[in-house]
Image (tube, rainbow, N blue to C red):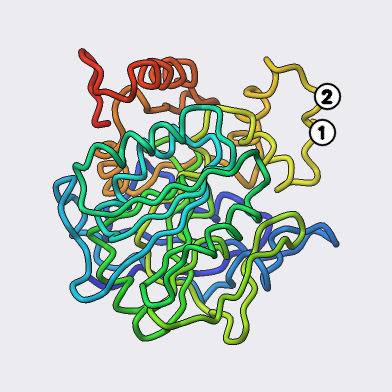
Amino acid sequence: MADSTFKQDSYPEASKYCAHADGGPEVSELECHMKEVRPFGEEAIYAASVFDYPAGTVGSYGDLSVMGAAPGTNFRIPGVRTQFLIPVWNDLLSLVICLPSVLAIADHVVLCDDGSTDGSFEYIESLAREGSHEAEITLVRAPEHQGWTQARRVLTEHQDPNALRVWADADDLFVPELWPRFVQELREAGCLPVGFHEVWGDSAHTTHWGLRGDPCHIALWPGDTRLTEWSKVTGFTTPVYREGKPEKVGPMCAFHMNGYKTDGRLAYKGIRLERFNHSGELDVLADSEVQDEAERVLFENFRHRPVAMPKVFTRYLNSRIPEPLKFSVVGRSRSGNQKVERTLRRFRDSGFRRMENEQTAF
């Protein structure tokens, strides 16, 4: 199958910034329309030189027909030791959904828990003890929450320069079936941002971002040491390169479950992305209003309108996300937050054991 095409549309025609919204096209009809990158003044966080990659530098979806292998299938690359480095902070929902996908392709996973209070640390501990996977798990715990930049600096101390290193987030759902093609291009480039499809609405909806990459999702071939440290630019954690910063994004091999959260971080992120949001600062809102604001950011902001994803993506996500942990888009809002939170509480209280009478894949 030929790679899907990309084109750059003109700001601010937001309806053009996403995959077709006609109920989800089949793969052969898929087009991804990349937004035009325009900084928003000095406080911009999507300057092209830092966070987004211009049209023409973004990788392709490739042959998606290979998606759908049985969960737990081993997709490790023979002869190449693969190490994942992942910061964690109150990411239990993301970890339950996403970490098994990492364990299917990694030989070693290093996670730095940055003071979680939601059970993330205990879940990773239980998974490491369970031994139902072949990957080695190293869990480092910070004494208190210090932020993503410091967590990644801690992880730097544990990276193996002789391994294929992947800097990822706890909300990255990797597609093992697409991993070999990404590794093939990484072998040639030495260093590539991970190509991922952004998911904000639910398992059937996304936003105009579509396929993209960002600096916090970076892969380096064994022996490539150009990434020297992690710093903070315009409020976001970014890598610092000795030389040869990557100039393109690799092919898709993951979903970034960016909006798959039940707490206020979603609303805070939206506030920072859009300086002209009418709500002002979230610290003036009552707790009950935070989730409402998060949904407004998701579904009313013209840059974050949910649209149907290609059917192959919806099918894949639905097969990987346990039923009790699914959200659904109804009209212009998302439902399911309370259901998901109750499920996570029961899962945590059970000591992270499989729950009876629930369609879970934990």
| Residue at left offset 65%, top offset 38% | 144
Answer left or right for 84 relative to 333. left
Where does residue 258 sit, x and y in percent of width and height? 51, 44
| Residue at left offset 33%, top offset 71% | 182
Question: Which element is circle 1 on?
Answer: loop
Where does residue 290 sit, x and y in percent of width and height? 68, 24
Amino acid on which disc 1 is placed: Glu
Question: Which element is circle 2 on?
Answer: helix
Amino acid on which disc 2 is placed: Val
Q: Quadrant of the C terminus?
A: top left
Q: How busy is the neighbourhood of tag 2: few (under 14 within 10 Å), some, or many (20 plus)? A: few
Number of labels in the image equals 2
Picture layout, residue 233 above or below residue 310: below
Q: Are marks 1 and 2 in contact (CB under 8 Å)?
A: yes
| Residue at left offset 56%, top offset 41% | 305
Q: In which quarter of the image is the N terminus?
A: bottom left
| Residue at left offset 33%, top offset 49% | 310
Picture layout, residue 59 above or below residue 128: below
Where does residue 23 sit, x and y in percent of width and height? 36, 40
Camera-side residue: 216 or 277?
216
Name the residue at the front extreme.
143
- Where is mark 2, residue-wise? 284
Camera-side residue: 130 or 193?
130
Where does residue 153 sit, x and y in percent of width and height? 61, 60
- Where is mark 1, residue-wise? 281
Q: How busy is the neighbourhood of tag 1: few (under 14 within 10 Å), some, or many (20 plus)? A: few
